[in-house]
Image: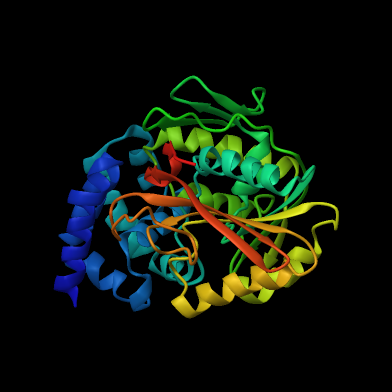
């Protein structure tokens, strides 16, 4: 077992972390070379031993003041010192690491989703003739997607959408020559997040965990996260805990009857079985018996049921932006664009 675990950590350091975090590259490789560290990691439940989760758990110890040597190495950007300190912190704090890794999931909350969601939600409202929308984000984590109208989005072609006074600034590159629709977003009258384990940004430990899921040398992303946390905390969304298929009826009930419910999913459906995805689609269809319902998705090619794929191949390196409108059980579904890197690059095609 240790041999396979060592390979996992070495590969993570030399391939995945190398692109984003020199510190994590060095720490992951050091863990892969330490028999003591690997034996400690093996005390974590098997499905919870992935480097992203263990490194986040160690970072959580740093942020909570439980690993001062590792904190100092991270602050100095010293990879060699961090490698040794991480092994020491893991061995001394393995009980805490096991607890954190067992009850938490690695999170990758990104403000970049807004650049994809904003034009698609605005287009859905236009097609439905809606003057107000209620946002329901499935797989919401901390609910950042629900602030889509409260951020400043700038596209590489000079276009901008959202609130130019916002402290949350979201850049997005444009692929191809087509401009995104310059439509205003109607008033947002409800913000509802649905997740099996939602994070409350007003809870200190939940917010600390979001910070811990970033590598300590990802300073630009950390600054964006702080701005997003502050924005979300200023008007926290309603968070519903549970399976999306089961909780969606309750979420729809939170949207006023004169507003268009817009369900959003961003890379949330791939964790569901095909049967569950089809049940999710059925829930949207059921909700549309009394009023129109929209669904805006950014999912891998072929993941979102009913959304066309432009004939693209699975695992092609990009995702499909889908827009579906349910009106009295009539479904109109369209692929409106492609995006890359979790929304940091967008090709609008509708």
* Residue 326 percent across, percent down from the top left: 66, 62
Q: Is residue 167 left or right of residue 187?
A: left
* Residue 215 seen: no
Task: Reply above or below: 206 against 91.
Answer: above
Work out whether residue 228 or residue 344 is closer to the camera in this orientation and state it.
344
Q: Which quadrant would residue 264 be assigned to in this image?
A: bottom right
Task: Reply above or below: 344 against 197.
Answer: above
Q: Which quadrant would residue 312 be assigned to in this image?
A: bottom left
* Residue 138 percent across, percent down from the top left: 60, 61
Q: Is residue 160 left or right of residue 274?
A: right
* Residue 329 percent across, percent down from the top left: 68, 69
Q: Is residue 33 left or right of residue 291?
A: left
Identity of the residue drawn at 73% across and 69% down: 287
Identity of the residue drawn at 22% across and 60% down: 9
Image color mode: rainbow
Identity of the residue drawn at 39% across and 57% down: 300
Work out whether residue 298 or residue 208 is closer to the camera in this orientation and state it.
298
Task: Reply above or below: 98 against 225.
Answer: below
* Residue 31 percent across, percent down from the top left: 22, 58
Q: Is residue 79 left or right of residue 235?
A: left
In the picture, which quadrant includes the N terminus? bottom left
Label count reads 0
Work out whether residue 53 or residue 270 is closer to the camera in this orientation and state it.
270
* Residue 31 seen: yes
Work out whether residue 142 or residue 66 is closer to the camera in this orientation and state it.
142
Identity of the residue drawn at 30% across and 57% down: 88
């Amino acid at each position: 077992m240790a041999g396979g675990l060592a390979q996992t950590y070495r590969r993570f350091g030399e391939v995945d972390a190398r692109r984003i975090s020199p510190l994590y590259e060095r720490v992951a490789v050091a863990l892969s070379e330490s028999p003591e560290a690997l034996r400690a990691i093996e005390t974590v439940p098997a499905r919870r031993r992935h480097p992203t989760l263990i490194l986040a758990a160690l970072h959580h110890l740093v942020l909570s003041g439980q690993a001062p040597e590792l904190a100092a190495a991270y602050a100095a950007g010293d990879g060699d010192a961090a490698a040794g300190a991480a092994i020491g912190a893991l061995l001394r704090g393995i009980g805490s690491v096991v607890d954190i890794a067992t009850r938490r999931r690695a999170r990758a909350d990104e403000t970049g989703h807004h650049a994809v969601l904003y034009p698609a939600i605005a287009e859905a409202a236009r097609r439905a003739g809606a003057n107000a929308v209620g946002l329901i984000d499935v797989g919401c984590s901390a609910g950042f997607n629900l602030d889509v109208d409260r951020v400043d989005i700038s596209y590489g072609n000079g276009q901008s959408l959202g609130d130019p006074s916002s402290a949350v600034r979201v850049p997005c590159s444009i692929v191809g020559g087509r401009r995104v629709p310059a439509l205003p977003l109607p008033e947002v009258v409800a913000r509802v997040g649905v997740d099996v384990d939602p994070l409350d940004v007003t809870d200190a430990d939940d917010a600390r965990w979001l910070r811990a899921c970033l590598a300590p040398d990802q300073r630009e992303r950390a600054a964006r996260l702080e701005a997003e946390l502050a924005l979300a905390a200023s008007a926290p969304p309603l968070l519903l805990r549970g399976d999306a298929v089961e909780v969606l009826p309750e979420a729809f009930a939170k949207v006023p009857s004169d507003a268009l419910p817009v369900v959003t999913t961003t890379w949330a459906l791939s964790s569901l079985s095909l049967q569950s995805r089809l049940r999710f689609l059925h829930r949207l269809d059921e909700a549309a018996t009394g009023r129109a319902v929209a669904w805006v998705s950014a999912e891998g090619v072929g993941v979102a049921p009913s959304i066309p794929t432009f004939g693209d191949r699975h695992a092609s390196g990009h995702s499909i932006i889908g827009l579906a409108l349910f009106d009295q059980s009539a479904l109109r579904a369209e692929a409106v664009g492609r995006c890359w890197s979790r929304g940091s690059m967008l090709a609008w095609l509708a």
